[in-house]
Amino acid sequence: MPDVKTLVLTGASRGIGHATVKRFSAEGWRVLTCSRQPFDPRCPWPGGEENHIQLDLADPNKTIEAIGTIKNKINGRLHALVNNAGISPKGPGGARLGTLDTDLRTWGMVFHVNFFASVVLARGLRDELSAAGGSVVNVTSIAGSRVHPFAGAAYATSKAALAALTREMAHDFGPLGVRVNAIAPGEVETSILSPGTDRIVSALPMRRLGQPREVAEAIWFLCNDQSSYITGTEIQINGGQHV
């Protein structure tokens, strides 16, 4: 009987993260979820509470401490790490925060969650990833490659940095037998969407929002043997928004 495969997923409580848990759980994977929120008993996957780690990735000390907790739960082998957590603070009334009105603490908080946590977790779990011939998937954004009407400057630049980090990690982790890729979602139907998104959607080639399950399928692909010779790549999932 083969070993049950294990996924560690950050930002699991909603949207893309929630869909990813359901996709991997349906395939028999054990999913360890990391979220600022405590486990919600309404979540429909088995073993959810015992496999949940309440973790605020904005606190670097807590992120580092969590590595020991994760190691104790995964028995030396980690088949996939998905760095999905992301925050995009807004100004008064939900206004976009640009470079002129984002304070330093906000920059720091966004980069700790959206960027630094990804490399801290991957580096801390490198032995377990290597032992399993595992895969890392970083969730970037279309906002990392162009000015977006709603995503703030700190969010956008953190996602651009995460795309560059993906290339660097692919280079460094490859000799360990670990693949590192990114997915860059566009307008996906989650609670992070801002009012006015419908105007963007009406101009997309596919004329519709993406669904979280469609993003989860791409993550699933990158964590399995179908993508065994793919590393250092960022896949655009945006209905043609990038063209």
Image (cartoon, helix red, strand yellow):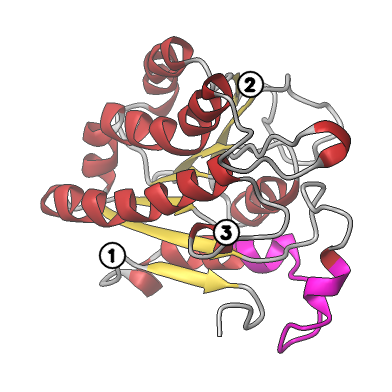
Looking at the picture, which amino acid does disc 1 mark?
Thr
> How far across and down, in percent of the image, does residue 45 sit?
73, 41
Residue 22 left/right relative to 104: right
SS at mark 2? loop
The residue at which mark 3 appears reads as 143
Q: Which residue is mark 1?
A: 231
Q: In the image, what residue occupies the spot 34% across and 67% down?
A: 233
In space, the residues marked 1 and 2 are separated at their CA atoms by: 32 Å
Q: Are marks 1 and 2 in contact (CB under 8 Å)?
A: no
User: At label 3, which amino acid type do we have?
Assistant: Ala
Compared to 214, does 66 lie above or below?
above
Q: Nearer the viewer, mark 1 or mark 2?
A: 1
Which sits earlier in the primary sequence, circle 2 or circle 3? 2
- Which stretch did the figure color magenta? 198-216
C-alpha gap between disc 2 and disc 3: 35 Å
Q: Amino acid at mark 2?
A: Glu
Q: Say whether marks 2 and 3 touch (CB < 8 Å).
A: no
Q: Which residue was labeled with disc 2?
A: 50
**Residue 189, image quadrant:** bottom right
Which residue is at 24% across, 48% downward?
Answer: 169
